[in-house]
């Protein structure tokens, strides 16, 4: 199931036909989408070189080790396995996490990466110590860790992720922030430098380019460095100045989809035999290799009119990459349309991340109720508690169509409350081991784009039969508590129920009720309400839930929970064209918090219940503590800039973050910057099967600071919740035990984790796409920004109006010069602005962490690229 090949939608991509070996040729360089590298011989190559070649091509890559040798090497501890992360900004740099949580292991260059792609689970062999990387202690010039594309667990951002398409939530806390300059110009610059940097230069590092750029701009700049070790032989240095390096010897699991979007070009050598048979595919993602594709798969007039296709996006599937070729072999799957347009770009993103957006198969649809309109049978009714007369309602984003959860709150004669969380009973419709179950388990999650949703389940279920639509009888799974007004839980009940929601409230409606508790709402101000219940009754229930939620929330943070709220961008779209008309930061308010508290409560209650009943088979969600190495770096950084942060636990971290940073209006902005920084060492929360993990202390959820947690509240959009529903049902004796063994549950948990990460990344890329189009259509855009990181020739900012992070390069600004220095241990850049008029003095501007600056975002004239430029400071 985790085999990525099965996740590409075969109907979109077609079955790869074998591309003949003549589409492979050996050249002296690696041509990746962003430029070229000379092949660096590894020790294996050197050995091979002495063997007689007998006419065979010289190998560029080492042959992979055998499965047996890999297995034995891992057992003996001579080899290390882990997920490969390729730096999206410097694609010759890759990393795998160190098993002991210390600094990542560095994989330098394309040869050492040995044809593995981003996300693959690889096995590496450490290189000898003399080849380890020397870390400059001041850390000013570049990052030594790879970016985690997005590592803040949803549980920390709020479990109740708004389920609407137009929200663009979860902005990416990339460690290395959008290196705009690198991306746009890399290809042209590197092609230009290619002739000068051939042969003896082993690889083209971006340092060289940075220097060429800086010199090219003619900026005078000095960098004062700390006194670090002047020695260059790693063997003579202590380990704290070193980063271990390794080479890939085996790919355990190809997690990367092997699909990429990009452009096709004719080969450069018109006279070669190859020119008549193949074209070159250049991926947009520089982490994927260039590939030869058969001309037979290209449009018929491509050879005669290549210029017509210069801006046309294609999807290509990497089908092979031989040891003796610098280029992969690709199969063109389809043309998408013009680069920079919403739909082609969206389809490209979905395909690259292996999201199945095909229609549901007839076999899967046959599993749905065939006689419509569907009604609950009397036999089913008899097995359930009938709650249809109770005041139960949903609170969701206004655009949501898949309503998973409903709430109720009834005051009891003794002054306590009966609070209920009612979740759509998806497992009634999706039965184990059916065709529909198989599709849902493979999709594993719905994917929320800015403009639409790619659902996990067919529309009939997610928008009709399972969706808790108002004034419709619906099957649910409920958790109900007896609660004091202060939120103390006295009693708990789980069971299968039937509800009839009396109104579909939006977060805005609930928020108005909370903000105006005395107001009498007229029917026109709210959506249609069931005649069985008054508006006043609903409003009272919302207010009671809000008060109880405040107590629960307060207690959670006293008990040591952590929440990292990052700015999330939402868009308003033109109804006709679908283009972004405006964008705003999504406001997380009391109505969101109300829903979140009760969803957390239900998830925790269900986690305890299924683990008690099935200690070997429970599907729970754990959140490991932050990565030691990155946390240590962050602690050191906070000390350098004079921030007093207590990192000893999730709770102390939350407390530090929420004790305001000064009383001025920018304390919120400083908090945003810190939230971004704190997100970096955080790990992803993970689904797992309790029978596979022996140590119960590893079950903990770091951010929520609880021993057991799971996902139960969103079965329409998450497959993990469907399994949890089956476990809960079996624990109550309402159904037979789940058929899956613990190993199968763990495999499904792993797959859910992979798809969760992919869908999160797709969501971020969708928001990035719409924002880039917004800048192009409505820009230039001005905003205040706060500096969040200072390097020696650039600095990173958080653009406060839009929550995006950008890197600003000194050599893109009209400066006479710039100077980097450490003040104490705090990095600082001084920019010397060119005077606007000859008689004026040069204007200095000091850039350090938390400096407030004005930036302008402008479109770069390349599809979907935009830059942030610093506005010149005013003279006063």
Image (cartoon, helix red, strand yellow):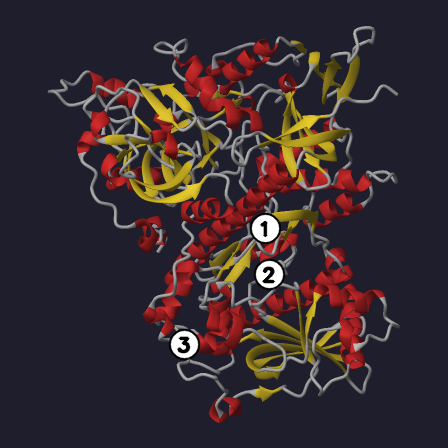
Question: What mark, if any, has residue 368 been given in the picture?
Answer: 3
Question: What mark, if any, has residue 163 been given in the picture?
Answer: 2
Instruction: Please state the horizontal and vertical placement of residue 679, each as a whole percent of the image.
Output: 63, 42
Instruction: Please state the horizontal and vertical placement of residue 385, each as a whole percent of the image.
Output: 59, 87
Q: Which of marks 2 and 1 is nearer the N terminus?
A: 1
Label 2 – label 1 distance at C-alpha: 16 Å
834 left or right, relative to 792:
right
Q: Earlier in the sequence, mark 2 or mark 3?
A: 2
Few, some or many residues within 10 Å of mark 2 (<14, 14–19, 20+): many
Few, some or many residues within 10 Å of mark 3 (<14, 14–19, 20+): some
> Please, is residue 344 above or below residue 855 in the view?
below
Instruction: Please state the horizontal and vertical placement of residue 729, each as a whole percent of the image.
Output: 49, 77
Judge by depth and name the residue closer to the eye, 47 or 293.
293
Helix, strand, or loop for circle 3?
loop
Residue pointed to by mark 1 = 153
Helix, strand, or loop for circle 2?
loop
523 left or right, relative to 756:
right
């Amino acid at each position: 199931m985790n085999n990525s090949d099965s996740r590409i939608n075969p109907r979109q991509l077609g079955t790869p036909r074998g591309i003949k070996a003549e589409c492979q040729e050996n050249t002296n360089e690696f041509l990746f989408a962003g430029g070229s590298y000379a092949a660096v011989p590894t020790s294996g190559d050197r050995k091979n070189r002495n063997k007689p070649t007998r006419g065979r091509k010289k190998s560029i890559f080492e042959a992979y080790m055998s499965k047996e040798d890999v297995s034995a090497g891992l057992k003996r501890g001579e080899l290390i396995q882990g997920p490969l992360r390729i730096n999206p900004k410097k694609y010759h740099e890759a990393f795998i996490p160190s098993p002991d949580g210390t600094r990542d292991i560095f994989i330098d260059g394309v040869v050492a990466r040995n044809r593995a792609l981003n996300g693959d689970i690889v096995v590496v062999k450490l290189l000898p110590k003399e080849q380890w990387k020397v870390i400059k202690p001041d850390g000013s010039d570049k990052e030594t860790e790879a970016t985690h594309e997005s590592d803040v667990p949803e549980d920390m951002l709020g479990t109740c992720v708004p389920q609407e398409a137009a929200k663009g939530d979860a902005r990416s806390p990339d460690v290395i922030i959008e290196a705009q300059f690198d991306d746009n110009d890399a290809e042209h610059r590197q092609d230009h430098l290619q002739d000068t940097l051939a042969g003896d230069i082993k690889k083209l590092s971006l340092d060289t380019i940075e220097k060429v750029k800086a010199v090219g701009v003619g900026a005078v700049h000095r960098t004062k460095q700390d006194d670090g070790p002047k020695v260059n032989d790693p063997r003579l240095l202590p380990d704290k100045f070193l980063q271990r390096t390794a080479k890939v010897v085996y790919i355990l699991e190809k997690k990367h989809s092997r699909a990429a979007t990009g452009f096709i070009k004719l080969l450069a050598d018109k006279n070669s035999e190859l020119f008549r048979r193949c074209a070159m595919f250049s991926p947009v993602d520089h982490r994927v290799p260039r590939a030869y594709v058969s001309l037979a798969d290209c449009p018929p007039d491509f050879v005669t009119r290549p210029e017509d296709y210069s801006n046309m996006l294609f999807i290509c599937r990497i089908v092979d990459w031989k040891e003796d070729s610098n280029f992969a072999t690709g199969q063109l799957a389809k043309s998408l349309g013009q680069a920079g347009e919403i739909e082609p770009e969206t389809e490209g993103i979905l395909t690259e991340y292996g999201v199945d957006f095909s229609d549901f198969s007839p076999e899967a649809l046959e599993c749905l109720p065939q006689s419509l309109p569907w009604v609950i049978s009397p036999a089913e009714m008899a097995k359930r508690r009938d709650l249809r007369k109770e005041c139960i309602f949903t609170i969701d984003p206004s655009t949501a169509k898949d309503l998973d959860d409903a709430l109720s709150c009834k005051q009891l004669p003794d002054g306590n409350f009966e609070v209920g969380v009612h979740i759509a009973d998806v497992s009634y419709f999706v039965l184990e081991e059916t065709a529909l179950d198989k599709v849902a388990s493979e999709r594993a999650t719905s994917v929320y784009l800015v403009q639409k949703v790619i659902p996990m389940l067919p529309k009939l279920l997610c928008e009709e039969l399972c969706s808790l639509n108002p004034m419709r009888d619906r099957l649910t799974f409920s958790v109900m508590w007896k609660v004091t007004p202060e939120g103390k839980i006295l009693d708990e009940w789980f069971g299968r129920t039937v509800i009839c929601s009396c109104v579909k409230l939006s977060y805005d409606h609930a928020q108005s009720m909370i903000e105006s508790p005395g107001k009498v709402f007229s029917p026109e101000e709210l959506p249609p309400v069931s005649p069985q219940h008054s508006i006043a009754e609903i409003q009272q229930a919302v207010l009671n839930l809000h008060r109880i939620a405040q107590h629960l929330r307060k207690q959670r943070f006293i008990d040591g929970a952590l929440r990292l709220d990052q700015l999330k961008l939402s868009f308003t779209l033109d109804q006709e064209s679908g283009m972004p008309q405006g964008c705003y930061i999504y406001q997380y308010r009391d109505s969101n918090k109300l829903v979140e508290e009760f969803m957390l409560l239900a998830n925790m209650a269900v986690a305890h219940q299924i683990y008690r009943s099935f200690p070997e088979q429970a599907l729970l969600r754990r959140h490991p503590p932050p990565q030691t190495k990155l946390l240590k770096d962050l602690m050191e950084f906070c000390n350098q800039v004079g921030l007093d942060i207590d990192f000893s636990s999730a709770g102390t971290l939350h407390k530090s973050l929420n004790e305001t940073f000064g009383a001025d209006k920018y304390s919120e902005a400083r908090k945003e910057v810190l939230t971004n920084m704190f997100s970096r060492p955080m790990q992803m929360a993970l689904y797992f099967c309790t029978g596979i993990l022996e140590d119960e202390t590893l079950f903990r959820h770091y951010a929520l600071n609880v021993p057991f947690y799971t996902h139960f509240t969103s079965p329409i959009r998450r497959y993990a919740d469907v399994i949890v529903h089956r476990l809960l049902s079996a624990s109550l004796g309402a159904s037979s035990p789940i058929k899956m063994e613990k190993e199968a549950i763990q495999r499904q948990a792993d797959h859910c984790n992979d798809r969760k990460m992919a869908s999160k990344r797709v969501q971020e890329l969708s928001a990035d796409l719409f924002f880039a189009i917004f800048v192009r259509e409505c820009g230039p855009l001005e905003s205040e920004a706060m500096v969040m990181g200072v390097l020696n020739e650039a600095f990173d900012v958080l653009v406060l109006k839009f929550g995006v992070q950008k890197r600003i390069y000194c050599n893109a600004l009209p400066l006479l010069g710039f100077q980097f220095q450490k003040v104490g241990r705090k990095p600082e850049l001084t920019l010397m602005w060119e005077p606007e008029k000859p008689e004026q003095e040069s204007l200095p501007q000091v850039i350090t962490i938390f400096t407030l600056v004005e930036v302008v975002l402008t479109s770069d004239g390349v599809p979907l690229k935009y830059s942030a430029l610093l506005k010149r400071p005013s003279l006063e």
